[in-house]
Amino acid sequence: MNTTPRTILITGATAGFGRAAARRFIAAGWQVIATGRRADRLDALRAELGDAVHTACFDIRDEAAMRAALAALPERFSGIDLLLNNAGLAQGTKPAQAALLSDWKTMIDTNITALVTLTHALLPALIARKGAIINISSTAARYPYVGGNAYGGSKAFVSQFSLNLRADLHGTGVRVTTIEPGMAETEFTLVRTHGDQAASDALYGGAHPMTAEDIAETIFWVASQPPHLNINRVELMPTSQSFAGFQVHRNG
C-alpha cells in the first residue's frame, strides 16, 4: 500500500482561498507547495502548518521565476498530484470606457497568461501521475455586470480553457474542474479598489457572503472524489446573492 502523501501546488497561497485551501489539505494529510508574492506570509504559513509545506516566493506573472521554482522543488515535493490554479485578481470597478488599460493588462497577465503557462509546464507530470487540475474561475465568467469587463472576460477564458483541457486530456486519467464562486469575503475587493476599505465593508456588510473556508472545503471535496469521477464545474453563491436582472436604459 502506498502511504506517500499526495502533493498539491497552490498558487496565490498567501491569502483568501489559497491560504484556506493550504490549511484544509494539510489537515487531511496532504503535502502543500504554497506559492505567492509575499514572503512574510509564506513564512508565516509554513510556521503555522509545518514541514508538510514547501514555500516558493515569486510573482506568478514571472515565467522565469516560476520555472526556477519548479526546478528547485525538493525531491519530496516533486511529484505533484493536484494543481490548484487559484492566483488571480480583479482590478478596477469602472465601466470599460473609464477603465485603466493597465488594470486590464494586469488581469489578463495574471488570470490568463500566468495560469496557462504554469498549467502547460505541469501537464507532463500530471499526466504521468494521473493527477488533477482545479481552476478557480468566478460567477463573473457567466453573468456580466457593470465594471466586470476584463475581469469577467478573463474568468470566462478560465472556464472555457478548463473545458477544452478536459477534452484534450480525455483518456489520460487527468481530471479537470472549474470552481466558480460568487460573493466571498476575502481581500478580493481591497485589491480591486486599490485598498479602499470602506468600499469593501459596504460590499460585504449585511450580505453574509461565503468565506474562504467555504471555498476551500469545496476544493477539497472535488479533490477527494474517486479517480473515475470528474466534477466538470461547480458554481456556488451565498443564499443572499442571485442572478442579476437585465438592465434597461430609458430616454427622457
Image: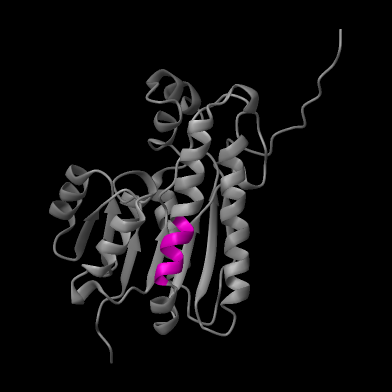
Magenta residue check for 121:
yes
Magenta residue check for 151:
no
Quarter of image, res 119: bottom left
Would residue 23 be seen by someone viewing this image from the given angle?
A: no
Judge from the rendering whether residue 97 lies leftward or rightward of residue 21; answer left or right: right
Q: Position of residue 123 (x, y in %)?
A: 44, 73
**Image: 57 above or below 140:** below
**Image: 229 above or below 10:** below
Quarter the N terminus occupies: bottom left
Query: Residue at point 45% right, 80% down?
Result: 127
Residues rendered magenta in the picture:
115-122
Q: Position of residue 199 (x, y in %)?
A: 45, 21
What secondary structure do most residues of the magenta stretch adopt?
helix
Judge from the rendering whether residue 20 lies leftward or rightward of residue 40; answer left or right: right
Would residue 204 be seen by someone viewing this image from the given angle?
A: yes
Q: Position of residue 178 (x, y in %)?
A: 54, 59
**Image: 67 above or below 152:** below
Query: Residue at point 51% right, 74% down?
Result: 175
**Image: 35 above or below 163:** above
Q: Position of residue 156 (x, y in %)?
A: 62, 50
| Closer-to-camera residue (39/5) | 39
Q: Residue furthest bottom?
A: 1
| Closer-to-camera residue (70/218) | 70
Judge from the rendering whether residue 33 lies leftward or rightward of residue 199; answer left or right: left
Q: How many marks?
A: 0
Q: Residue furthest front?
A: 64
| Closer-to-camera residue (43/223) | 43
Quarter the C terminus occupies: top right
Query: Residue at point 57% right, 46% down?
Result: 154
